[in-house]
Image (cartoon, rainbow, N blue to C red):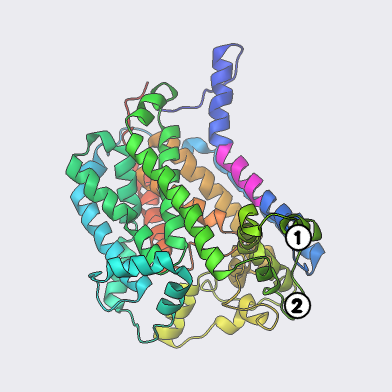
């Protein structure tokens, strides 16, 4: 099992200590680099946003990144806390023993999710092939067609079941990657079909999210398990999992290709950027990028529309935040960080807190629903923009604790939480991706609960391969 040497010394042990320390700190370095790069793209990238309240905006973002670093450092300082200690019950083989139960629950979740996404009349996807062909051939028309289905309504008991079981999709992918060599051909086939089914659902309605989610879940789970494996065993681990590696690569390529197809259909050319302009200011393509795109070669071959749409996709939440930072706080009592919770509160209890949110307060300058708002803005609904610094402190500590727990004890709940954390952090500049939707919100809560229980009871998950 991976451990951190107590002290550095000259020779090979010193090198091992540095390598181990880098492994523990790698997520923090990657996250700070990504979030910092997204801010640079927002400021200097090919799309010129008319940034508002620049002093407050940059000061707050610097504070958020600093607090994340402090929180992560605190988790690393006490990283021994996140490993099991003493005489504990081993959970080796846990996921294999419950494979069929996990598979059945995950299959139920993807069928309910498919019906909710496609707004179909039945939980059995009888029109799957025709919907898929339509979505691939004309993603824009498929998207508009499904979104215009006004008569669709969910079933509260089924929705509750969907939320409670949603985490099993993550556990299923963990089983497929971690125990691939031990699974029978039937288990492998059925597991892959269920795990990849959300890709088909997304393609049916011309939307990118399910495709990206599957790509991130497979890739993150695989990379995490590689790092959780002792260094001497990693090559053998990867060789034994050629198929999961291929699946992860294919889903990543498919996600990029499908994003390009949908963006080309919805936002052809550079003129899409100007459509983001509102009463708050004019959004423009920077002259150097326009000159590059309009010089000789067809823009499509240079990927100009794809790049500009991608930049708008990533950074528009920062723009909304820059408008919001000077608005007064009216707390939403812990519900404002989640659109799902706000909608449920209004639908079932008749309590409408939306007018108190920053998104509604700036709707005259930037759409409350049509435009995206950064995760910072949505978290600020509950605690204010300065209070988000505390949220980032907690998030940094939690990310560090989960990563240390996965490395030190191969905790299943920690390993399955990692893809959700990647999705949450990747979309921070754009929106509050994890907490806005029931499936990811419920998965986050359930896995957090299991992780806390495992820490309290000292359960130790068995290593994927024998420890060296």
Task: Identify the residue at image location x=35%, y=40%.
Answer: 244
Q: Residues within 10 Å of mark 1 (few under 14, many from 20)?
A: some
Residue 432 in view: no
Residue that carries the numbered disc 2 in the rendered image? 280
Question: Mark 1 or mark 2, which is nearer to you?
Answer: 1
Q: Is residue 25 magenta?
A: no
State how many labels appear. Answer: 2
Q: Is residue 131 left or right of residue 7?
A: left
Q: How far across and down, in percent of the image, does residue 314 sit?
A: 62, 60
Task: Identify the residue at image location x=54%, y=75%.
Answer: 333
Q: Nearer the viewer, residue 39 or 387?
A: 39
Q: Is residue 30 magenta?
A: yes
The answer to which image quadrant residue 274 occupies is bottom right
As displayed, is residue 145 above or below residue 35? below
Task: Identify the residue at image location x=47%, y=48%.
Answer: 253
Q: Is residue 435 left or right of residue 129?
A: right
Q: Is residue 379 left or right of residue 257?
A: right
Instruction: Kindly state the secondary structure of the residue where label 2 is placed.
Output: loop
Give the residues drawn in magenta, as a range.
26-35
CB contact under 8 Å: marks 1 and 2: no
- The numbered mark at residue 290 is 1
């Amino acid at each position: 099992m991976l451990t951190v040497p107590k002290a550095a010394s000259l020779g090979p042990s010193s090198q091992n200590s540095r390598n181990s320390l880098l492994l523990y700190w790698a997520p923090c370095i990657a996250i700070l680099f990504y979030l910092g790069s997204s801010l640079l793209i927002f400021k200097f990238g090919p799309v010129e946003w008319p940034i508002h309240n620049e002093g407050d905006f940059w000061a707050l973002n610097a504070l958020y990144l600093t607090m994340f670093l402090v929180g992560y450092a605190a988790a690393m300082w006490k990283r021994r806390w996140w490993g099991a200690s003493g005489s504990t019950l081993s959970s080796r083989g846990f996921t294999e023993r419950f494979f069929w139960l996990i598979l059945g629950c995950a299959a139920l979740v993807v069928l309910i999710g498919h019906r909710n996404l496609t707004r179909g009349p039945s939980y059995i996807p009888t029109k799957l092939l025709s919907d898929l062909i339509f979505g691939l051939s004309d993603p824009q028309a498929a998207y508009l067609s499904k979104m215009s289905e006004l008569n669709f309504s969910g079933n509260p008991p089924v929705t509750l079941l969907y939320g409670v079981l949603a985490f099993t999709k993550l556990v299923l992918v963990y089983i497929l990657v971690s125990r691939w060599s031990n699974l029978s051909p039937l288990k492998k086939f059925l597991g892959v079909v269920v795990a990849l089914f959300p890709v088909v659902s997304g393609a049916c309605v011309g939307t990118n999210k399910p495709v990206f989610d599957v790509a991130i879940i497979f890739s993150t789970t695989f990379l995490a398990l590689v790092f959780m494996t002792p260094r001497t065993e990693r090559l053998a681990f990867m060789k034994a999992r050629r198929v999961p590696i291929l699946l992860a690569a294919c889903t990543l390529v498919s996600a990029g290709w499908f994003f390009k197809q949908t963006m080309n259909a919805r936002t052809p050319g550079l003129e899409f950027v100007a459509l983001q302009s509102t009463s708050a200011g004019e959004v423009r393509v920077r002259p150097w990028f326009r000159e590059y795109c309009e010089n000789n070669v067809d823009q499509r071959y240079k990927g100009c529309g794809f790049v500009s749409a991608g930049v708008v996709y990533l950074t528009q939440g920062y723009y909304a935040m820059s408008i919001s930072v000077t608005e007064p706080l009216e707390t939403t009592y812990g519900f404002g960080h989640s659109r799902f919770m706000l909608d449920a509160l209004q639908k079932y209890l008749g309590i409408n807190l939306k007018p108190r949110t920053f998104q509604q307060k700036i709707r005259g300058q930037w759409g409350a629903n049509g435009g995206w708002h950064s995760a910072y803005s949505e978290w600020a609904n509950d605690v204010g923009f300065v209070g988000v610094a505390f949220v980032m402190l907690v998030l940094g500590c939690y990310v560090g604790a989960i990563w240390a727990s996965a490395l030190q004890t191969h905790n299943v709940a920690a390993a399955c939480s990692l893809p959700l954390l990647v999705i949450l952090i990747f979309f921070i500049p754009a929106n509050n991706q994890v907490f806005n939707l029931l499936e990811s919100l419920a998965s986050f809560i359930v896995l957090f609960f299991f992780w806390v229980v495992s820490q309290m009871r000292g359960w130790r998950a068995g290593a994927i391969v024998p420890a060296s």
